[in-house]
Image: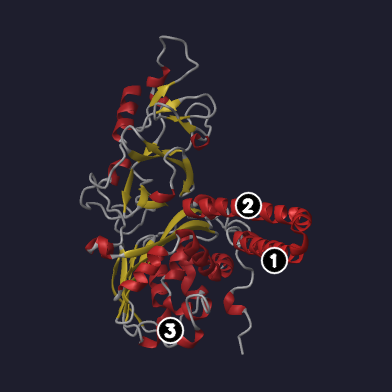
Amino acid sequence: MSNSVLSQQDSQQVLTSQTIAPQEFPAGGLDPDRFEWQEVWYPVAYVEDLDKSQPTRFTLLEQDIVLWWDKIEQTWRAFVDQCPHRLAPLSEGRINELGQLECPYHGWSFSGTGRCERIPQQAEGTKAEVSGRACVTSMPTTVCQGLLFVYPGRVENASKTKVPIVEPLEEDPEGWICLNTFRDLPYDALTLMENVLDPSHVPYTHHRTVGNRANVSAVELEVVESGKWGFKGTWAEGPRKGTLGRQDTTFIAPGLMWHDLTSKQFGRTLTVVYATPIRKGECRLFARFPFKFSSKLPGLFLKLTPRWYSHIGQNSVLEDDQIFLHYQQRCLEKRGGSANFTKAFYLPTKADLFVFQLRSWVKQYHAEPFPGETLPPPLPKEALLDRYHSHTKKCASCRTALTNLQRLKVGVAVVAALVWGLLPLLVLIQGQASVVTATISTLAVVSGALIWFGLGKLERKFYQGREVPPRNLPEKK
């Protein structure tokens, strides 16, 4: 029995982008009338935000998993985050000197396939580690377009199921300039998809960030094809009252969409969003903004912009929606959810066609990710606007920038304090020039204080969003 279990563990090899076969199974399983959320590849992290020296915890469809770098096989691994010994989370452990994932509780260690390699407490000559019960469940992984994907479903289906990638990026990978961000959001993956598929909310919700109420016009959406796989649609006039041209939209079930827009002024731009379900009422957003500019200057500017700085602005845009979406999904749940969406929502215009199509897809394919579960109690605004735990501490760029910023604050404070403390001595030494010295020293201290307060204001942006969104601020006269 143990040998058969071990054989199964050996088969749970990490899949690389080179080993993935052409699609044989549709995402969501083989049943044409039902969508299984387990049978899908999900992005869980940008590779650049993962630390190869230590394990990282994530929750996917309510299953805690641990992500870690297998330096022996030079690939990323994903295990169920439980040691088979006493169920301690392996994410609290370490990657030991042998390149194995080591449990923090008793030091049991595991190789990349999930096989137990060492049980320090057993007597010499015994082999408890060869039992199938000593193995950790491993999930297939692959890296595509800079994202680490995990497959939580049946292992044998992983290599036959297509990874949901952004197809236009494959056409000319080197020709795109791409801005990326992510954040853990306090609402469902379907709520996120519903929001980003709706282009008509942008002028109002995101007024003064990426939208403008002056650009509001009728939105005539059209669905051109659909199925269990998702749907494609178009907006013939396009945003900004048609000044930018037609916008095409693709939804790849259950959690990927992109808007595709080509204009003479800006070139081709995509708005890409992945929604990875964490648990009921929570998901991780991966937002990507690929650009092909008609001139080189905007691209050069974007390349020079620090990733952490663009994340601050992108977090502000996300917070335009954050609070009301958190409450909106609770209202929908009380009215019956997607099964009753036509009565819960009043959708009289074609501007809501993509929302209608998404909710119809959920209903038609019984595609609720957490059937029968209810949302947790609503969170206060302070928690909804938290940036540190939902993004900063998990983002390599922002985490490093925050540390450097805090060090710089300390340095500025120390220098200003030294100058102020040495001022009497400088006046005494300078004699007649004491007035000039005192003036310069005072200016230096005041400048240091202003810099310190400015750095403090920037520092707060890594921790918390603003309570009043820009759209609700008084209009300038």
Q: Are marks 3 and 1 in contact (CB under 8 Å)?
A: no
Instruction: Say which mark, if any, is on residue 411.
Output: 2
Number of the label disc, if any, that sits on residue 443: 1
> Residue 322 placed where, x, y %?
55, 66
Question: In this rendering, is residue 168 above or below 96?
Answer: below
Residue under the point 54% across and 66% down: 329
Q: Amino acid at mark 2?
A: Gly
* 380 relative position to 199: left or right: right
**Residue farthest to the bottom?**
477
Indicate the secondary structure of the residue bearing disc 1: helix
Quadrant where the C terminus sits is bottom right
Q: In the rendering, at what x and y percent does residue 163 appear?
A: 30, 53
Comparing labels 2 and 3, the label whose residue is closer to the camera: 2
Along the viewing direction, whichever of 360 and 55 lies nearer the viewer: 55
Instruction: Tell me which colouring the rendered structure shows.
Output: secondary structure
Residue placed most toward the observer, 74 or 109:
74
User: Which quadrant is the N terminus positioned in?
Assistant: top left
Residue bearing the label numbered 3: 349
Badge nearest the viewer, 3 or 1: 1
Is residue 303 in view from this perspective?
Answer: yes
In the rendered view, would you say 11 is above or below 223?
A: above
Mark number for residue 429?
A: none
Question: What is the three-letter code of the residue carrying label 1?
Answer: Leu
Q: Residue 149: horizontal and vertical position, in percent? A: 36, 49
Label 3: state its secondary structure: loop
**What kind of element bears circle 2?**
helix
* Residue 252 quadrant: bottom left
- Packing grade of label 2 (10 A; few <14, some 14-19, many >=20) is some
Left or right: residue 43 compared with residue 30 = right
In three-dimensional space, the C-alpha distance between marks 3 and 1, rounded to whole angstroms, equals: 61 Å
Looking at marks 3 and 1 on the same chain, the residue that comes earlier in the sequence is marked by: 3
Whether residues under marks 2 and 1 lie with C-beta atoms below 8 angstroms apart, the answer is no
